[in-house]
Amino acid sequence: MTSMRGRVAALLGAVAVVAGSTLTAPPAGFAVVAGVQGVGGGITGQAPCPEAPGFICGTLTVPFDRSGATPDTLGLRVALTGNSAAPRGDLLFLTGGPGQPGAPAIERMAGRLEPVLKDYRLVMFDQRGTGQGALQCPGLQEDMGSSDLAVPRRQSIADCAAALGPDARHYSTADTVADIDLLRRALGARKLTLDGVSYGSFVAQRYALAHPTRVAQLVLDSVVPQQGFDPLDLAALPATARVLRAACRATGCTTDPAADLAATVRRYGNGARILSALTGYEFVDPNYGGVPEILHEAAAGRPEKLLDFFEFVHREVDAAPAEELSQGLHSAALCADSRFPWGTTDTPVDVRPAALERTRERLTAEQTWPYDPATATGLSSMLVCLHWPREQVPPTPHRRKLPDVPVLLLGGDRDISTPYELLYEQAELMHHPRIVIVPGAAHSVQSRAENPAGRQAVHDFLLR
């Protein structure tokens, strides 16, 4: 796959340039000075961030087990700008995953949000189990890296569950929501403006449901439904056809990538692996350059380039240490948060496979095309939790409207991970949502899209 490697290497270089085009110091108007007052007495050890000295870092101490059964605490790293008297208050940016830290990204996100940072104090933090305190599951990390969908070895799942043990239940989104409210109080803020991307959009919605009077406004980028990820991914499966065909038209390809994908899945039964590779590759190239040709050859019985593509994405795109995206935290949170064909993780392990098989038998080609029902029931988000030890899980909030606060919903029309069909569904649960779909953008619009329309929409929304 020499031509593909060359194309992707060039694209990765372009992404690196974008990622590196951040501020070396904060913009004028919020420079950090020693002894800044009002940062929040509950954040200890405040000092310039070692990797970004123009910003303040400190530690928020939170209870590990909110039941009180154990007295342990966790120290969560917090990073923020020094403009404690910002006229519009605190803007908490929530990263994705679950498993991605926040504090290391403050310099980059300050660059993306620079036009609003005279009015807002930007705050980011490492959610429990991420960053310097990342949950470590080496086998699962090797198998999956930063991928949501790569299928791990069953032994890696067992080893991770054994390593985390009963403590895994304390890494749910409900715990993170409670941590955020402690962070709000530590900051001395009456309300927060929340800007969440991907899993961060889910956390933001869950916070708004749990603490409706503590939210000023919401930006939800690459929207995950308030009820959580669908382990069957029944939005992403059909959306793949729309996205690949749109990318094909944009690049002038002459095949039908959706039909070729369907034929490839029928021939090789590798739908889960294809979906995982595509959702990784969208971060590199939202035009999915070279993918239609690869699928066309595979559909015709020549899978060599497709296999090379799988290996490339796993090695060059998805590979990541736990400090960048903890698969231990990812698994613990999803298994605690999600509802599966067998119910929740409180369901006995031995009855889960039969329930999953019954679900596969009921799925139709229309629901899963251009994939097949086996793809929906064979993704890692399903398989990890299929074998996860039984544990008590927090209750799932009833599906209901968010508080009546301003909401911006942001999506890309090339996003397979969280396709915009999900965004429109969630808009029905909001009072007066503003919706912006950015042409040519894939997942994580604010951070990654070349088209600046999404970032401009955020700036206009926050400064309106």
Image (cartoon, helix red, strand yellow):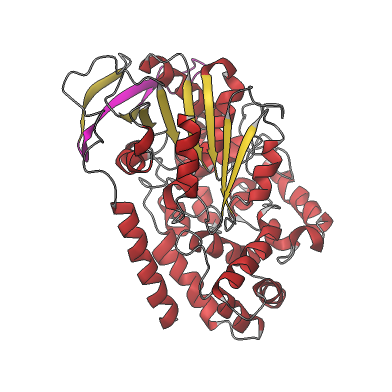
Instruction: Pick out the residue farthest to the left.
Output: 34
| Foreground of the two, 159 or 105 | 105
Determine if the magenta segment contains residue 58. yes
User: Is 23 placed above or below 63 here?
Assistant: below
Q: Which residues are magenta?
A: 50-75
The answer to whether residue 339 is seen in the rendering is no
Q: Position of residue 338 (x, y in %)?
A: 64, 39
Q: Residue at x 46, y 55 (%)?
A: 451
Q: Which quadrant of the figure has residue 89?
A: top left
Q: Position of residue 76 (x, y in %)?
A: 36, 28
Q: Is residue 164 left or right of residue 26?
A: right
**Quarter of the rendering occupied by the N terminus:** bottom left
Q: Residue at x 81, y 61 (%)?
A: 366
Q: Position of residue 142 (x, y in %)?
A: 42, 57
Determine if the magenta segment contains residue 363. no
Q: Which quadrant of the figure has residue 88?
A: top left
